[in-house]
Image (cartoon, rainbow, N blue to C red):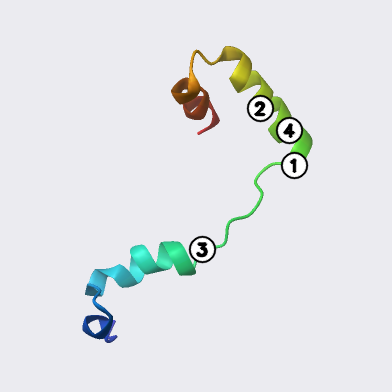
């Protein structure tokens, strides 16, 4: 893949790493609101702290 990466201060591999992640991936909803609510509620109930909570959601 040839592009003028040096003109903008990037590395060639940034095309499909940094740039793709930020500008070529669209976030979308995975679960409906009710299911998401139940998963979050369950994770909060079982979690011992915020890190545990986030780990359960991941």
Q: Image height check: is 4 above or below 41?
A: below
**Residue at the spot of label 1:** 32
Q: Where is mark 4, residue-wise?
A: 35
* 23 displayed left or right of 33: left
Which mark, residue 39? 2
Residue 1 image position (x, y, % from top left): 29, 81
Tag 2–tag 4 contact (CB < 8 Å): yes
Give the distance between the C-alpha atoms of the residues marked 3 and 4, in whole angstroms: 24 Å
SS of the residue at dot 3? loop
- Which of the two labelled residues, at mark 3 and mark 1, occupies the earlier sequence position? 3
Q: Mark 3 points at which residue?
A: 25
Whether residue 12 sits left or right of residue 52 in the image: it is: left
Disc ID at residue 24? none
Question: Label 2 vs label 4: CA separation?
Answer: 6 Å
Give the mark, 2 or 3, whose residue is nearer the N terminus. Answer: 3
Image height of 22 relative to 43, above or below: below
Q: Position of residue 49 (x, y in %)?
A: 48, 17
* Crowding near the residue tagged with mark 1, few <14, some 14–19, many ≥20 C-alpha atoms within 10 Å: few
Nearest to N terminus: mark 1 or mark 2: 1
Q: Is residue 15 above or below residue 53?
A: below
- The reply to whether dot 2 and dot 3 touch (C-beta < 8 Å) is no
Do the residues under discs 3 and 1 have CB atoms within 8 angstroms?
Answer: no
Helix, strand or loop under label 1: loop
Check disc 4: other Cα within 10 Å, few if <14, some if 14-19, many if 20+: few
């Amino acid at each position: 893949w040839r592009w003028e990466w040096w003109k903008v201060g990037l590395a060639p591999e940034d095309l499909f790493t940094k740039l793709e992640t930020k500008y070529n991936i669209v976030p979308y909803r995975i679960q409906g609101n009710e299911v998401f609510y139940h998963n979050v509620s369950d994770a909060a109930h079982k979690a011992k702290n915020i890190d545990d909570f986030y780990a359960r959601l991941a």
